[in-house]
Amino acid sequence: MRSVLLLAVISVPVLGFGQTNTQTQKQSETHHKATLEEQKLCSEQAMKFAGAHSMVVNHYDKDRNICFVRTWETLYDPKDEKKFVGSALELKDAFEGFTYALCMTDENNKVLTCWSNEPSGNTTRTFTTTDEWTSYVTSTYMSR
């Protein structure tokens, strides 16, 4: 009798895990609606934003029909190209050029300006750190 009871207790979590895994897979499939061609076009357009001192990440949001490009650029003094003066993080529409979010820091990583438009376009949100900005931009625009 003990072995039958133990088997029942062990099998319930395994069955529950299988259901959760299937639900996660279905959710994942609905979030990846962009075709490979759409992703490729977005990636090619986003690379046009790459510079000598920048990193580029792109994401095509099929529901919004927007190719987002997030750049992180290291800024140097124009008179002394070895002197670091800050960073600029920006989220744009890769095709339209509209800026959705911007965060600029000085050479000590102190935030000079850090904001993002809400997806509705009616409100602007401000941030005190680049980590807050990155987290918000990633979850709001880059992961759908």
Image: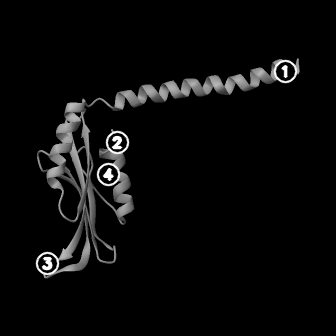
Q: Is residue 122 visible?
A: no
- At horizontal 69% and vertical 23% (from top left) the residue drawn is 12
Q: Which mark is residue 143?
A: 2
Query: Colour scheme of this structure image?
Result: one colour
Cα–Cα span, label 1 and label 2: 46 Å
At label 4, the amino acid type is Val
Q: Can you give x and y, in whole percent of width and height, for residue 49 in the image?
A: 16, 54
Q: Can you give x and y, in whole percent of width and height, for residue 96 in the image?
A: 11, 46
Q: Find numbered disc 2 in the image and state the secondary structure of the residue it sits on.
A: loop
At label 1, the amino acid type is Ser
Q: Which mark is residue 137?
A: 4
Discs 1/2, front? 1
Q: Residues within 10 Å of mark 4 (few under 14, many from 20)?
A: many
Answer with left or right where residue 16 lies relative to residue 23: right
Q: Is residue 135 visible?
A: yes
Discs 3/4, front? 3
Asked if 5 appears above or below 65 in the picture, the reply is above
Q: Can you give x and y, in whole percent of width and height, for residue 54 in the image?
A: 23, 62
At label 2, the amino acid type is Ser
- Disc on the earlier residue, 2 or 4: 4
Q: Are marks 3 and 4 in contact (CB under 8 Å)?
A: no
Cα–Cα span, label 1 and label 3: 76 Å
At label 3, the amino acid type is Pro
- At horizontal 18% and vertical 56% (from top left) the residue drawn is 50
Q: Are marks 1 and 3 in contact (CB under 8 Å)?
A: no
Q: Are marks 1 and 2 in contact (CB under 8 Å)?
A: no
Q: Find numbered disc 3 in the image and state the secondary structure of the residue it sits on.
A: loop
Query: Which residue carries the number 3 mark?
Result: 78
